[in-house]
Image (tube, helix red, strand yellow):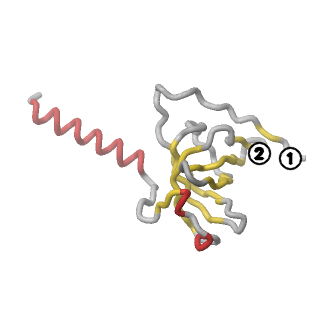
Amino acid sequence: MDRRLKVLSASAIIIAVLVVGLWGVDFQNTVTVSDLTDEHIGKRVTVEGEIKPGTLRSEDNGSTVLFTLADGNCEVDIVYAEPQPVNLMEGQSATVSGTVLPDRTISAYKLVTACPSKYSSPNTTLEPQHNT
């Protein structure tokens, strides 16, 4: 296989991985946590940030995941009642799409996480919290 074909094949694989990894992320309307204002209440938004350490938890026997998304300046609480991504962990970058509620919590319908690094800390196990 000549060098040009190898470079072309490697480029095609890299592009395919990027497309699959970013599938479903709406970059046109993506904002940071700091960009959220009262004008966003009641509207659908896509917000990017980092899952704040110490905030990842589950409720309702694991069917609802709650965490805080932060960007270094501001924070917003997230409620995600969809199937949980396998690689969800604290300290990880995430992009959340959902509706901003009047209490400034985001009710998320889509959650895209970055691939974890083999050099990052181990996953945080979610412990179900029982509603009383």
Residue at image position (62%, 65%) is 99
Q: Are marks 2 and 1 in contact (CB under 8 Å)?
A: yes
Q: Position of residue 32 (x, y in %)?
A: 51, 57
Is 108 left or right of 22, judged from the image as shown?
A: right
Q: Position of residue 118 (x, y in %)?
A: 47, 26
Residue at image position (75%, 35%) is 127
Q: Is residue 79 above or below residue 11?
A: below
Residue at image position (59%, 61%) is 98
Residue at image position (58%, 26%) is 122
Q: Is residue 42 above or below residue 52?
A: below
Q: Quadrant of the N terminus?
A: top left
In the picture as drawn, the residue positioned furthest to the right comes out as: 132
Look at label 1 and name its amino acid.
Asn
Q: Count neighbours of disc 2 (C-alpha within 10 A) and say few if under 14, some if 14 to 19, many if 20 or more.
A: some
In the picture as drawn, the residue positioned furthest to the front comes out as: 73
Look at label 2 and name its amino acid.
Glu
Q: Which residue matches tag 2? A: 59
Q: Position of residue 36 (x, y in %)?
A: 57, 64
- Alpha carbon separation for disc pair 2 and 1: 7 Å
The mark that comes first in sequence, 2 or 1, is 2
Q: Is residue 128 above or below residue 31?
A: above
Q: Which residue matches tag 1? A: 131
Q: Nearer the viewer, residue 114 or 109?
A: 114
Is 13 left or right of 60, judged from the image as shown?
A: left
Is 100 left or right of 47, judged from the image as shown?
A: right
